[in-house]
Image (spheres, grey):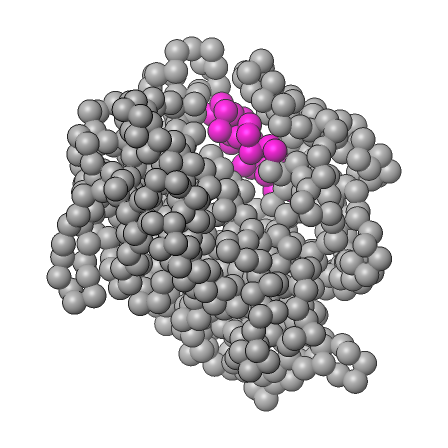
Amino acid sequence: MTSIAIIGSGPTGIYTLKGLMESETPLSVTVYEANADPGKGTPYHPRANDRAMLANIASIELPPVCESLTHWLRRKSPAELAMLGVPVETIGEREFYPRVVLGAYFEAQLNALLAKAVARGHTVDIKASHRVLDIQLRESDINVEVKGEDGATDSKAFDHVVMATGHDWPEKTETKPGFFISPWPAKNLDTIGDVSVGVLGTSLSGIDAVVSVATAHGSFLLDDSGTMQYHSASGPDFHLTMMSRKGLLPEADFYCPIPYEPLSIFTEAAVDRLVDTVPDRLLDEIFELFRAQLFASDPAYSERIGLGMLTVETVADAYFSERESYDPFTWAALNLGEARTNKATRTTVAWRYSILCMHETVLRAVPHFNEEDLKRFHKYFKTLFVDDYATVPHQSIERLLALHRAGRLSVLKLGPDYRLDNDSAEQGAVIEICDDRHAFTAFIDATGQHAVSAWDVPFPSLIAQGVVREARTVKASTAFAATDDTATVATGGIDLDSQFRPKFEKPLSHSLYCVSIPFLLHKLPFVQGITSAEELGSRVAKSILDDVGCREFGLKAVRHYS
């Protein structure tokens, strides 16, 4: 049998395994999981998350493994649903659930895949409490060194290895008294008392931190009118402050057709054509395509923001302008009301939907941007896409509004030149904005998963062998030069081919796949969440099965770097 190792049993590893199980040829698959309970995934694990923390993906958007999330929930007994914290009347395709519910779902789906594997003649071995220490490429196979549950180390050779290690959270989050570099594991935040709490980040990660601390000090309850209220027995010193550069809250999830309807102008074919024909001015041409699509989708909105006069550098300012003119909680309340009404009437806001659909297609161009365009994209253009697709569950906004009404939550606009000082204060941190000084006894960095360098790969042999290097892009001044190292510049992450295999020329196995999110974010900035996990897992599984098919017929697989 062809032998395959999958490192990590979270969603990406599970979707990879699902794709492999479609093979007509029996495979031998070993799944290594550092935790004791495989299948849950770090972002959805009960040890990492408060039960009040919500996932920001609706049931209808979650790609089924062996069954849909809605179908799985409807098979549960009332007692099982109560254990999960899911009222039976809330089950639906457009609903959002706590993160731990998704963890339980994926664990069940992994077990279902094991049954499917047996029926199809595959061998799948799940190694719980096994941490991979090193990966070494050899000429015809890949050696994996593992530390087992008993502390002993062992090694095994595989034909293919998939790095699906997922999110990279620090082991120790409270690096000094009252200063937390991550809101996970959530239980670490339980030590925060009735103090002033600063939360850096206003996205769902920031909301997770706020909700976790708030539920440790009180409760969210519905009043007689059905409005959510926050009740706390804490003293007046307990107060939460969320903060970001713009001082804005995320918008509520908006209704739209799923799967996405095809765009008329900003199509994959149109983007690919620009990649092939205008590499020296690719970003600006992509923006022209974006502008044409938005005008076609929603001419009234386009006129309102002055789209015809905007550029890559100014479009995000226009996009956020109206929201920035409001108090953030006033805007949140208005936006939530609009989102609820549109959901009830199945009304789609055209400009929101257009940008949402374009955010996936624009990813086809990002890896081809030259050095200057890549910087411009990340600094200016990316922001509006992120804001549009990173909307949050309605309940998350309801909780923020409830905290604000109770006098327990405010939002601070940092601007571009703030200073974070976590050294001079004995506890927490101090934020300095010009001459203003804001002190917080507890401080949580909730800015989410960050991109990391190739040199952060936790497997030393890959670095020692010189088979991982930072992803590269063409220098702006040499767009038409030969694509060697003199004409390119490192941008971070791992340099991977289209099948997510490290690029190198040494006579070693080319069957290592990296679909670990932190190493992909430099060139694929939107590749986060469960839909991305399914896309990555499916592509890697197909690549492996293609190679298996070639070997069956005695053919040598051809390696491409496109």
Instruction: Name the residue rendered at 17%, 48% in the picture.
Output: 156
The extreme top residue here reads: 481
The extreme bottom residue here reads: 233
Query: How many dots with numbers?
Result: 0
Residue 95, quarter of picture? bottom right
Reply above or below: 370 against 82.
above
Q: Position of residue 90 (x, y in %)?
A: 68, 71
Q: Position of residue 456 (x, y in %)?
A: 30, 44
Quadrant where the N terminus sits is top left
Magenta stretch secondary structure, dominant: helix
Instruction: Name the residue rendered at 79%, 42% in the picture.
Output: 350
Q: Is residue 311 or residue 349 the one in the foreground? A: 349
- The answer to whether residue 146 is magenta is no
State left or right for residue 478 relative to residue 85.
left
Q: Is residue 354 or residue 206 the one in the foreground? A: 354
Residue 59, quarter of picture? bottom right
Instruction: Name the residue rendered at 25%, 57% in the picture.
Output: 131
Whether residue 218 is visible to the viewer of this picture, yes or no, is: yes
Whether residue 424 is visible to the viewer of this picture, yes or no, is: no
Instruction: Name the residue rendered at 15%, 64% in the picture.
Output: 151
Quadrant where the C terminus sits is top left
State left or right for residue 100 relative to residue 270.
left
- The answer to whether residue 364 is magenta is yes
Q: Position of residue 447 (x, y in %)?
A: 50, 55
Reply above or below: 27 against 310.
below
Reply above or below: 369 against 173.
above
Q: Is residue 436 or residue 473 the one in the foreground? A: 473
Q: Position of residue 174 (x, y in %)?
A: 37, 68
Query: Where does the magenta region start and end?
Result: 361-384
State left or right for residue 482 relative to residue 237.
left
